[in-house]
Image (cartoon, rainbow, N blue to C red):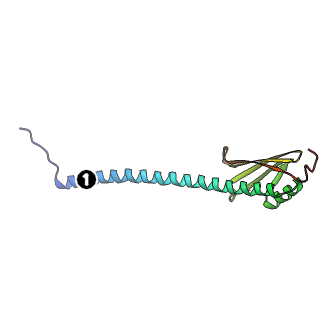
């Protein structure tokens, strides 16, 4: 007759503790991954919120001005730097985000394309906005 080996109660307790430890380790890893993903989504939402706010500020500056030179002065006062003729940029959000503005004037129609993005990932735009405004004074430089 074969002799059966039985686990003693001490060994059963260790086995049960091992299963509980494995279960709680898996639960902890899933919980941490959920919180990590939530943090990443929160950062992305924060970036989009800042992009919308900054873009709307620039759009209101453009819409409130009567001439191209006034727009340039107001953008400069906001902290937007002119990189070349009709192209502006600004760093915002404690240096984490960048806004680029491309402008053009045709007669009295001033058009600005505003793009906000994270410099670490310039291909993925956070927010894009196109603003068109009829200037009262027309183009300052005859474009």
* 72 relative position to 49: left or right: right
Q: Position of residue 12 (x, y in %)?
A: 21, 52
Point 53% across, 55% down: residue: 39
Tell me the quadrant of the picture where the N terminus can be found.
Answer: top left
- In the displayed image of the protein, which residue is found farthest to the bottom? 77
The kind of secondary structure element at disc 1 is helix
- In the displayed image of the protein, which residue is found farthest to the left? 1
Pick the residue in front: 22 or 67. Answer: 67
Kindly indicate the quadrant of the structure image that contains residue 107: top right
Pick the residue in front: 19 or 80. Answer: 80
Q: Position of residue 113 (x, y in %)?
A: 76, 46
* 23 relative position to 79: left or right: left
Pick the residue in front: 3 or 24. Answer: 24
- In the displayed image of the protein, which residue is found farthest to the right? 142
Point 78% across, 51% down: residue: 89
Kindly indicate the quadrant of the structure image that contains residue 17: bottom left
Pick the residue in front: 68 or 15. Answer: 68
Q: Position of residue 130 (x, y in %)?
A: 75, 47
Residue underneath mark 1: 16
Q: Residues within 10 Å of mark 1 (few under 14, many from 20)?
A: few
Q: How many marks?
A: 1
Point 35% across, 54% down: residue: 24
Point 60% across, 52% down: residue: 44
Tell me the quadrant of the picture where the C terminus can be found.
Answer: top right
Q: Position of residue 61 (x, y in %)?
A: 79, 57
């Amino acid at each position: 007759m074969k002799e059966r080996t039985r686990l003693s109660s001490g060994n059963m307790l260790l086995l049960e503790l091992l299963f509980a430890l494995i279960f709680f380790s898996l639960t902890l890893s899933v919980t941490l991954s959920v919180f990590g993903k939530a943090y990443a989504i929160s950062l992305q939402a924060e970036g989009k919120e800042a992009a919308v706010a900054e873009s709307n500020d620039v759009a209101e500056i453009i819409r409130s001005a009567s001439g191209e030179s006034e727009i340039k002065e107001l953008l400069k006062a906001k902290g937007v730097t002119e990189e070349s003729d009709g192209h502006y940029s600004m760093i915002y959000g404690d240096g984490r985000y960048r806004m680029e503005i491309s402008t053009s004037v045709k007669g009295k129609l001033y058009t600005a394309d505003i793009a906000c993005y994270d410099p670490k990932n310039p291909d993925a735009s956070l927010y894009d906005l196109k603003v068109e405004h009829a200037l009262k004074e027309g183009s300052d430089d005859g474009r």
